[in-house]
Amino acid sequence: MASRIEDFAVIGNCETMALVGRNGSIDWLCLPRFDSAACFTALLGSRDNGRWLIAPTATEATSTRRYRGNSLVLETTFETKTGSVQIVDALSRRDGVTDLVRVVKGLSGSVEMQTEIVLRFDYGRTIPWASRNEDGRLEFVSGPDRIILDSSVPLRGQDMRTIGRFDIRAGEEHCFAMSWTLSFRPLPDALDPKRVPQLEQNAWEEWASRFKPVATWSGPVIRSLLTLKALTHRETGGIVAAATTSLPELIGGPRNWDYRFCWLRDATFTIYALINGGFLEEARQWRDWLLRAVAGDPDNLQIMYGVGGERRLTEYEIPWLAGYEGSTPVRIGNHASTQLQLDVFGELLDTLYVARKAGLSPDEATWPVERALVNHLAKVRNQPDSGIWEVRGAKRHFTHSKVMTWVAFDRAIRMIEEFGVEGPADEWRHVRDDIHRQVCEHGYNRDLGSFVQSYGSSVLDASLLLLPLVGFLPPDDPRVIGTVRMVEQRLMRHGLLLRYEDGRGSDDLPAGQGVFLACSFWLVDSYVLLGRQDDARDLFERLLTLCNDVGLLAEEYDVGSARQVGNFPQAFSHLALINSAYNLVKHRGPAKDRSK
């Protein structure tokens, strides 16, 4: 039976991330990068598609787990009738080498343990050639990929798997180290696996020492910041939306997307989260990644890029994987990268404006890129697009998209006024005001007393909560108050928000949807702006209960089955958590931070 999404914890080294189950099995790992092909793919298939299990043989064993301090070093403790044992998992890196270390420690009594290593490259399809090299370590090679496995217990091959059994008593330790490198490079030196967890913990905690505490929620906020850092590539500064692909929005459904890429839409939320948390250098690295990624012809602006800024993210399906709990298809790449989504212009310009306000000085090339993007937006702003939710059907005039085009011009004008850059401010003011009139005329439904998802529709959308958050209208505007009221009435399920409704007016969830966690955090922010502090705090505390036992969130939550769904861990969810916590403490929302 597949583990629930919330049954996984993650370990990471700022290049890739592994999902470790409560049962001691690593079911997902891409090497060497977040978006590389997986060598452990049981998450989306079966154990035959690759995993690494270390666990007691006793079927009645129970487990608890925690992270070591403010780090990505994971401790899982198993209790059995004969004793207890702890597994310490850590991912580290060397030059051209990724190291996965697992240290097994006997805590009490004696416990019989088992390990099963099933290596399958290319997303669970390719069985590597196994051999033992001259220093006694096991070696697994397939094309450019090579894994070196070192173990303090005997291992043997059986049915294309590497297995072993051993007893461990109180005070004893056994170590395992798996090292990836390119097959045509020299063998990496053996490492001392006992030292790796402590070294990694020290490095993470040194990074976390810059954290600015936040009232009673410092625990979940720093864990979210650590998760965000772990999703950040150490060299490029790009932040992937999640570590996984094809975890479904609805169990058994087809809405299964690859999120191992960097979305421009996340940019403003990311900048706010990092600046609020005290991590200005990471904010600068993210800003610089954005500028490198979008540089070039504005006509070719994409809504997402690869970890290094790559543009070609061709989507295809993998037929040999059964999907998470039968949720097919399994997809690699993301076709949404080719969509027109006008809101990303607003998110990009807002990010660069916020970065300037925070003191992150731009280089000389920054403003010419921004100016070119705004000039291009002036030509395409009246086109329909695919919207924030990346609809794969007909394009529409989405209200949120048009509001974010207003944001793009507004922030460009502010940069001229506040930072002295040169640009056609009067011309852009005319465009900005025209967009504002258009949205208020066509995106507002007077019968409902609310803004709506797209021009002329009567459908509610949680993205409308962002209108006051980006400063489009003041929070006390009756149209904003009416929109919040209608979102509460028509999108709320069990106290949490859907992204949008399907128009049926039913209490059932629209097909393919769980409640989208970031949207509920946006409602927290809206409550703060409206002065509804008790409502904001209550909803925020409710959302914190949805984190798993080690503080992680997926994209969505299935209120019917009370489980997390969607890709994991989800940067968007953790970004929203961080920002809502700081908004609650400051008793203000981001709109006030953006005001002059």
Image: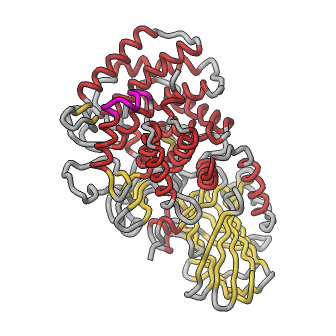
Image coordinates of residue 517 in percent, x first then y, are: 43, 52
Image coordinates of residue 453 in percent, x first then y, are: 28, 38
Q: Residue at x 50, y 36 (%)?
A: 589
Image quadrant assignment for residue 375: top left
Q: Residue furthest bottom?
A: 82
Q: Residue at x 52, y 44 (%)?
A: 580
Image coordinates of residue 391 in percent, x first then y, are: 31, 43
Image coordinates of residue 490 in percent, x first then y, are: 27, 49
Membership of 296 in magenta stretch: no
Q: Residue at x 24, y 39 (%)?
A: 394
Foreground residue among 451 and 63: 451
**Quarter the N terminus occupies:** bottom left
Q: Looking at the magenta stretch, what is its main secondary structure? A: loop
Tell me, yes or no, if residue 130 can be seen here. Answer: yes
Q: Report the span colored magenta.
A: 471-480
Q: Residue at x 47, y 57 (%)?
A: 542
Tell me, yes or no, if residue 148 can be seen here. Answer: no
Foreground residue among 316 and 293: 293
Foreground residue among 352 and 186: 352
Question: How many numbered badges does the structure rendering display?
Answer: 0
Foreground residue among 188 and 59: 59
Direction from residue 69 to residue 466 in the image, left or right: left
